[in-house]
Amino acid sequence: MAFNVSQERLEDEARLLFSVEVLLANIPSLITDLSSAKYALLSLTDKYRNEVKQKSMLIPSVSERFRELLDLRSQLQSDQEKLSELETKIVSSAPPKFISKEEAYTGSTTSAGYTSNDYHNDNEKMSIRCEEDPRNASSELLSETRRSDILLDNNEEGTKYIPQFGNNSNNRAVVFLEDEDLQKVQEAELKLEEERNELANLAKETNSMEDRFEIDRSRCEAMTKHVQGLKWDYEKTHTALIEARNERQQYELFQHEWKERKIISDEADKGLREIFGLCCRDELSIIAQALEDTRGSITNCSKALADKISKNEVELAVYQIAYKEQQAAAEELKEAIIHLQHHQRELELLAKRQEIEETKRNSIRQLLMSSLYLSPGSSEVISEELQPEHKKEIEDEHQMVSLLATRVGVMEERRREIAAILMRLSPTEEDIVRLKTAVEQVRSILMEELIINEETIRDVDSS
């Protein structure tokens, strides 16, 4: 049984070692997979880190540009408010017409005069231009206002402001200037034209800048979203890298523990094999010693059994002879008991006859006495008993017969017990214990002393 248990344990250990060898064979592939995953994660983290750095560096410049655009926008709004105010002022004023003295005294003076209708027409045209193109209209109004300012300055210096009326009843304000003043006015008009062009260009740049501002704002929002997504990806990658590092450390710790456990398991396996070998040798030596002891005890027991069998056979023969003798004595006692019972019956018949005769004699005596005394109960009844020798003979013979019958009955019971004990044993009985117990029972029955008393006599009589 112990050998089977140890063999099953060795099979389990062999299965465990096989599974460990398979795991150790797959460890290099697992290490390569983990290293490749580590390098991929490191490359991804480096790439995302560089992108995040670049975009984080772009964020301040974008914010500065955005701040500048907001400042420009506020300035443009203030300029637009000023321009609208100036436009309203220019539209409300009527610019005059500047001409020289030579043009005033030529034949085309009437056609060059500035009438009131022309003034109203110019005002209507200026309002239409303001509605169609407010920027150019504002520049023209500004030039006209500057002309009016120059005219007023020249008037203060000695120029003449003369309103003229033509034949078509159209009146317009006409300002006669000297050549030098007219040249200055023309130069101012050129400068005004340049400023108007600059203002138009500035308006175009402002519009394009507003468009670019909207585009940059949308790009900035997209960039912030992208940067936020990159930040989340970086955090996810960083957490994954930390988990991979922890797993790598756990794997290294597991590998180190596995090596230590393998060394311990090898040592334990070696120790178990040595202990198993020692146990097997000790077990074999113990089994051999036990076999020798059992063989010696078997030989001794066989010798003792042979001696006991021979001794018991002799005793059994003696007991059988004694049984036969007892059986013969019991037969003789039976014959004697039959004879004595016959003699006892005869004595009992004789006693009954005597009793009958005595009753007859007593009855005759009672009749005589009753006839004499005339009363049956007045005289004493005298009963004669048996003769003394007969009575003594009956007592002696009856006691001897009862004692003998009792002794014969007890011996008959003992004979039945011995017969029952011997009947339980077969002629080819080999069980020493049963033979020994049977012999002891027969010996105890034969060695028991016969005790005859009144109880045994009553028991025998009742049976």
Image: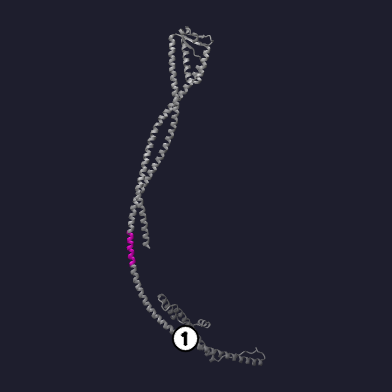
Q: Position of residue 27 (x, y in %)?
A: 35, 48
The residue lying at 47 percent from left, 86 percent from top is: 331
Amino acid tagged 1: Glu
Which quadrant: the N terminus? bottom left
Q: Quadrant of residue 45?
A: top left
Residue 252 vs 221, above or below: the answer is below
Outermost residue toward the top?
A: 105
Residue extending farthest to the right is: 374
Does residue 351 belong to the magenta stretch? no
x and y percentages locating residue 409 in the rendered image: 49, 83
- How packed mark 1 is, by other alpha carbons closer than 10 Å (few <14, some 14-19, many 20 or more), is some
Work out whether residue 311 can be spotted: yes
Name the element at disc 1: helix
Q: Is residue 107 above or below residue 143?
A: above
Q: Tell me where the magenta segment starts and ends, as one range.
A: 274-288
- Magenta span: predominant SS is helix
Against 159, is 381 above or below? below
Q: Visible in this render: residue 71?
A: no
Q: Position of residue 291 (x, y in %)?
A: 34, 68
Q: How is the image coloured?
A: one colour
Closer-to-camera residue (437/9): 9
**Image: 452 above or below 58:** below
- Indicate whether residue 279 is drawn in magenta: yes
User: Residue 307 versus residue 47: which sits nearer the camera?
Assistant: 47
Q: 173 or 223: nearer the eye?
A: 173
Q: Quadrant of residue 426?
A: bottom left
Instruction: Identify residue for label 1.
Output: 331
Percent x, y for residue 349? 56, 90
